[in-house]
Image (cartoon, rainbow, N blue to C red):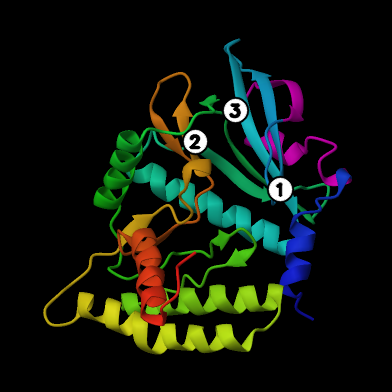
Amino acid sequence: MAMTAREVIKTLTSVPPQATSFLSSTISDHLPPGTKVLSFSPHGTAFWSKTFVIKTLQATGDPKSFFLKVTHTDIGRDNFMGEFESTKAIQSVLPNCVPNPIAWGTYAEDQNVHFLLMEFVDMKPEPLGIEQFTRMLTDLHTKGVSPNGNYGFHVPTFQGALKQPNTWTASWETFFTKMYERAFDWEQSVRGEDEEMQVLCRGMIENVIPRLLRPLETGGNEITPRLLHGDIWYGNSAMNAVTGTPLMFDASSFYGHNECKIMFEWNLDRFSQTLGISPC
């Protein structure tokens, strides 16, 4: 029987100690030949996984560190697959703006424990300046063009525990509506059904979204789907402490309208004005 939304969240936020008490041989297999592991210790925090730094000496004698995320359950595995593929997609157009993704997979010792391995990047804690941040996103949305002209992504990606419906879709209105419905249904399943909110959601889907999005692809207008980070905010961006260049991470990508984040907030604002209430 499928887990409820609350059960999904509970399992992802309660990684068992035995899943993080050892460095799997599977991880070692993905490190460069001749790597000598010096230490394996917790590093940073994450809501949906446990995070570690692996300090090593390479065959050349040079020190090198790697960043490891560990989780469990099939949803956690798919979450890591989505993040890995998202990071690879961004790296293909902006090579220096994401940590280098190395591998994702399942521990040989425990088939319910899954990992995501990347090169470690020392980051400055302060957020990016607005100019650096916007230039990075502009470069991503300019250079990252959908490979087939459709909206979507080749694997599922997640907003935390929420699985995004990334099926390739020709219409932005259709794709956005499916994303919106999925998020609303998830919230209702977590917080409990609310009849008033359901009425508001239906009005959004039947009236507001078509009014705002349909004109973008009708009457001779066209949109080129662009690669999006998918979960971009100041907490998922930082400065490379060594190079001083901007970084983004924890991606949940798909190809969509290049102003999707702004458009979504604008839609909520317009909808709230229509109802005569203040947007949150």
Q: In this picture, which residue range is highlighted in magenta?
A: 18-42
Element class at badge 3? loop
Element class at badge 1? loop
Q: CA distance from mark 3 to mark 1?
A: 24 Å
* Residue 49 numbered tag: 1
Alpha-carbon neighbours of circle 2 within 10 Å: few (<14), some, or many (≥20)? many
* Residue 99 numbered tag: 2
Of label 1 and label 2, which has the lower sequence position?
1
Vertical placement of residue 263 versus 204, above or below:
above
Alpha-carbon neighbours of circle 3 within 10 Å: few (<14), some, or many (≥20)? few
Residue 157 in the figure: left or right of residue 131: right
Q: Amino acid at mark 2?
A: Pro
Q: Position of residue 263 (x, y in %)?
A: 34, 65
Q: Residue furthest left?
A: 220
Q: Amino acid at mark 3?
A: Pro
Residue at 70% x, 74% y: name it. Answer: 191
Q: Is residue 263 magenta?
A: no
User: Which residue is disc 3 drawn over?
Assistant: 32
Q: Position of residue 271 (x, y in %)?
A: 39, 77
Of label 2 and label 3, which has the lower sequence position?
3
Of label 3 and label 1, which has the lower sequence position?
3
Q: CA distance from mark 1 to mark 2?
A: 18 Å
Q: Nearer the viewer, mark 2 or mark 3?
A: 2
- Contact (CB < 8 A) between labels 2 and 3? no
Vertical placement of residue 261 versus 207, above or below:
above
Q: Is residue 29 magenta?
A: yes
Decide if residue 31 is in sight here. Answer: no
